[in-house]
Image: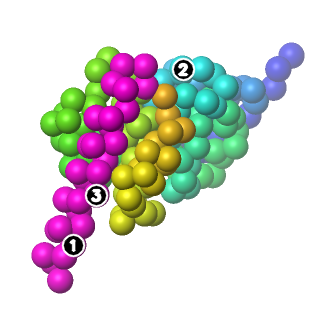
Amino acid sequence: MTTTHFLKLTVNGQTVEKPVLPRRHLVDFLRQDCGLKGSHLGCEHGVCGACTVELDGKIVRGCLTLAVQAHGKSVRTIEGLSEDGDVRDLQDAFVRRNALQCGFCTPGMVMAARELLEHKPDASREEVRQWMSGNYCRCTGYQAIVDAVCDTLAMRLRAAREAT
């Protein structure tokens, strides 16, 4: 008999309280128990980045993180970032640069790029390439993704300069 654990966490600003099996992955919990389908299951080995979510302010691979590890913590998914408007400029740049094709990897790409924008707002093109290399895309060839992130970095830098 498998024992369930009672999980209490914050997901995109909302308190969630649900029973969960101890071996359930965070991405499965988010998709199946919370109805948040933005994070995808790709490789299920933590390599592709399609399952990327934010846990207490830091991105993690949802396929490698157990849901019980999120107990008492805060999770943000692509849905939460989109609702907050936190990544609107980045999403617009992805569209402008055609940095999304099938869209499967896009939520994980945006989650990773958002963390870069926050922690390294002066990143060089090479640093963007390196940062984003942890996320796989089978469609775009990465050039457009790097362009979109670099465009957003430049736009935010300009806006910060104009504000001072």
The structure residue drawn at horizontal position 19% and vertical position 76%, both measured from the top left corner, is: 161
Residue type of the residue flagged with mark 3: Leu
Q: Residues within 10 Å of mark 2 (few under 14, many from 20)?
A: some
**Residue nearest the viewer, comparing 29 with 45:** 45
**Residue nearest the viewer, comparing 59 with 30:** 59
Of label 1 and label 3, which has the lower sequence position? 3
**Residue nearest the viewer, comparing 26 with 128:** 128
- Extreme bottom residue here? 164
The structure residue drawn at horizontal position 37% and vertical position 26%, both measured from the top left corner, is: 141
Q: Which residues make up the magenta segment?
A: 137-164
Residue 153 in percent (x, y) is at 28, 57
**Residue nearest the viewer, comparing 135 with 58:** 135
The residue labelled by disc 3 is 153
Res. 87 mark: none
The residue labelled by disc 2 is 42
Looking at the image, can residue 48 be seen?
A: yes
Label 1 element class: helix
Give the Cα separation between the discs numbered 1 and 2.
36 Å
The residue labelled by disc 1 is 160
Give the Cα separation between the discs numbered 2 and 3.
28 Å
Q: Quadrant of the N terminus?
A: top right
Label 2 element class: loop
| Front: mark 1 or 3 | 3
